[in-house]
């Protein structure tokens, strides 16, 4: 039997890229899939229903079951519609994969309020909307899987992505609280930071040799590498895995650390500017370097 036989999954943003490969892989493993995609551009503008329809057709041609949905995750009621599509078409829901995303990159000192709001709305609020809509159903049936997509842009850092990084680090927090709040109901939540070439990554500037090398490295990474981990986290095999942050870089799977104190100092008399200055060096050796994702992952992908 396939590992996801009789499971029903929603994959947001699954008309292209990583989401498409996840939807196809879940279907191959026996899941019935709601292919959600607004069909907009990488900046979130526009819509095209055929983007989701084509993935549904691919799944059906492979012998699977799927239905399209074109709602935006950024709207609370629309998220309810996406969940309701699964319940109406397949009579249940087991897996929610929050993958939908857009990019509106800009250096912080040039970023507009609209560029900030639109990215937060799709990534962070969209993940909340979908989680909030599905959680009562999962609570009632005492089972369910949430897989949320974060990014090293938030976990580590990248230039010109204040909106995206804030949303993706916020999703890591949402993921942890979802795991805590839903644990007693046998519902898990895990986050995945993907390394893969997609139309969103294709918008990275390539003005310098360093940027060109980074893009060349990313082009080696297929979205298909992400799907097996997502399928595992969606399955019964991962019932005891929750609240974690994973990365997939080619054929390499990693687990990210999560913030914990690494060093502390104590002063029985309390602190002042001068006393803090005097012990700065004791803390400084434990400071996190001001790095971007490419500094932490400079090596060739394992593909």
Image (cartoon, rainbow, N blue to C red):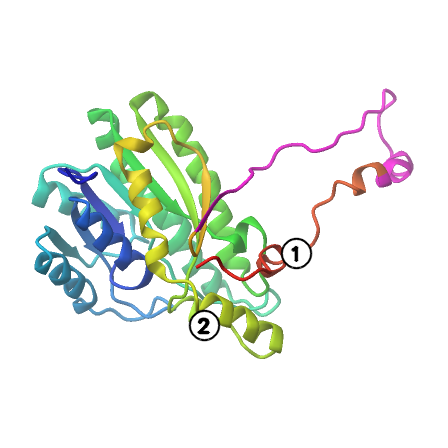
Residue 74: quarter of image: bottom left
Seen in the image, is 234 located left or right of residue 42? Answer: left
Nearer the observer, 195 or 175? 195
Q: Position of residue 97 (x, y in %)?
A: 30, 46
> Residues in magenta?
252-281
Residue drawn at 24 percent across, 69 percent down: 47
Judged from the image, the secondary structure of the residue bearing numbered disc 1 is loop
* Front-most of residues 227 and 162: 227
Q: Position of residue 133 (x, y in %)?
A: 26, 39
Q: Nearer the viewer, residue 298 or 40?
A: 298
Identify the disc placed on residue 203: 2
Give the residue drawn at x 87%, y 38%: 273
Was residue 271 drawn as part of the magenta stretch in this picture? yes
As drawn, which residue projects farthest toward the front? 303
The x, y position of residue 272, in whole percent, is 87, 33
The residue positioned 18% from the left and 49% from the top of the image is 27
Image quarter where the C terminus lies is: bottom left
Q: Which residue is the site of mark 1?
A: 291
């Amino acid at each position: 039997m396939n590992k996801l036989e009789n499971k029903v999954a929603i994959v947001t943003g699954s008309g292209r890229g990583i989401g498409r490969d996840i939807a196809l892989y879940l279907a191959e493993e026996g899941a019935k899939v709601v292919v959600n995609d607004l069909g907009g551009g990488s900046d979130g503008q526009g819509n095209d229903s055929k983007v989701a329809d084509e993935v549904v057709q691919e799944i059906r041609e492979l012998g699977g079951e799927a239905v399209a949905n074109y709602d935006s995750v950024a709207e609370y009621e629309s998220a309810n519609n996406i969940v309701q599509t699964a319940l109406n078409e397949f009579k249940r829901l087991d897996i929610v994969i929050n993958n939908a995303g857009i990019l509106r990159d800009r250096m912080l000192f040039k970023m507009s309020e609209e560029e900030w709001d639109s990215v937060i709305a799709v990534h962070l609020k969209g993940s909340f909307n979908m989680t909030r809509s599905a959680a009562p159903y999962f609570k009632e049936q005492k089972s369910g899987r949430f897989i949320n997509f974060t990014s090293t842009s938030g976990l580590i850092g990248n230039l010109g992505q204040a909106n995206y990084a804030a949303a993706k680090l916020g999703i890591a927090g949402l993921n942890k609280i979802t795991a805590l709040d839903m644990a007693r109901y046998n519902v898990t939540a895990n986050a995945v930071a993907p390394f893969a070439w997609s139309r969103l990554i294709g918008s990275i500037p390539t003005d310098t040799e360093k940027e060109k090398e980074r893009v060349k490295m990313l082009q080696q990474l297929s979205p298909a590498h992400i799907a097996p981990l997502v399928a595992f986290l969606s399955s019964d095999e991962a019932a005891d895995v929750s609240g974690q942050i994973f990365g997939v870089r080619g054929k390499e799977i990693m687990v990210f650390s999560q913030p914990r104190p690494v060093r502390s100092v104590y002063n029985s008399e309390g602190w002042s500017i001068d006393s803090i200055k005097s012990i700065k060096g004791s803390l400084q050796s434990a400071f996190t370097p001001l790095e971007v994702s490419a500094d932490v992952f400079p090596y060739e992908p394992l593909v």
